Amino acid sequence: MSLRSSSESGKEEVNFLRLLVVLVVLFVVHPLISGTGVLSSSLVNLLFIAAVAIAATSVPGRRVVRSTVYSTGAVAFLSSWAAILWGQTWVELVVYGSYLGFFTLVCANVLGHVFRGGEVDTNKLYAVCCVYLLAGIAWAFLYALIETSAPGSFHLADGVVGSRDRISQLIYFSLVTLTTLGYGDIVPISGFARTTASLEAIFGQAYLAVLVARLIGLRLSSKREVS
């Protein structure tokens, strides 16, 4: 039993580490290859597909949970390529909605792993970082849904052309909001956009506060069990 648990733990650690690496690469590389051309759009899609594939295999839980995550990821995969071919607004909404659903599901399941009991090991710390970045991506696609449904909900930076530039700007805005930096170069205009941004800022602060308390509690609990 001990050997099996160790093996499973090692597998999960590799998955969460891979997920963390691909998310960091996504944030770093995505702005560099965003554009309106077919090549840049294809590269962006491949990058997100890699993130989707790694994220899907990193989801702990029951088979029904994994199946739901895989199905949502498949919709995101297919609709993203359809957006390149057709480029219609309703297709973009499907892309943003499917990515929002996918990253939200992954974030919720990894968060459940973080808050479950157990030793505070390296794997759990990887998961903690993954949830923070996944939340930033999920909110960015929510902002994209809002902006696409009601253009002008956000004041984006000058020179933004096409959906790829838009999502790149909104990922940046989401991270700035999540960390409450608030540079002010991208601004929510509509009431719903402002409310959504406020909720993300609250989540970012509450997550760190609750997370630290939870990890300390798990650490103390594991020490008591050892003693």
Image (spheres, rainbow, N blue to C red):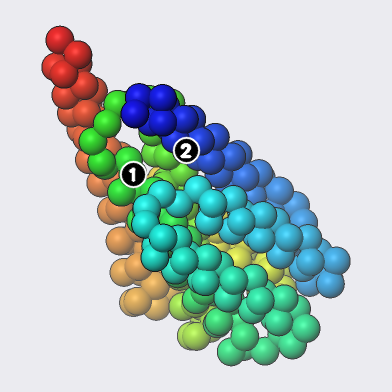
Residue 37, above or below 1: below
* Circle 1: element type: helix
Crowding around mark 1 (Cα neighbors within 10 Å: few <14, some 14 to 19, many 20+) is: some
The front one of 154 and 66 is 66
Which residue is found at the position 28% from the left and 53% from the top? 202
Q: Do the residues labelled 1 and 2 touch (CB within 8 Å)?
A: yes
Mark 1 or mark 2: whose residue is earlier in sequence: 2
- Decide if residue 62 is in sight here: yes
Q: Mark 1 points at which residue?
A: 113
> What is the tally of numbered marks visible in this picture?
2
Residue 138 position, x and y percent, is 46, 61
Residue 164, above or below 151: above
Which circle marks residue 12 in the picture? 2
* Circle 2: element type: helix
Residue 99 position, x and y percent, is 53, 68
Which residue is found at the position 62% from the left and 85% from the top? 91
Q: In which quarter of the image is residue 195?
A: bottom left
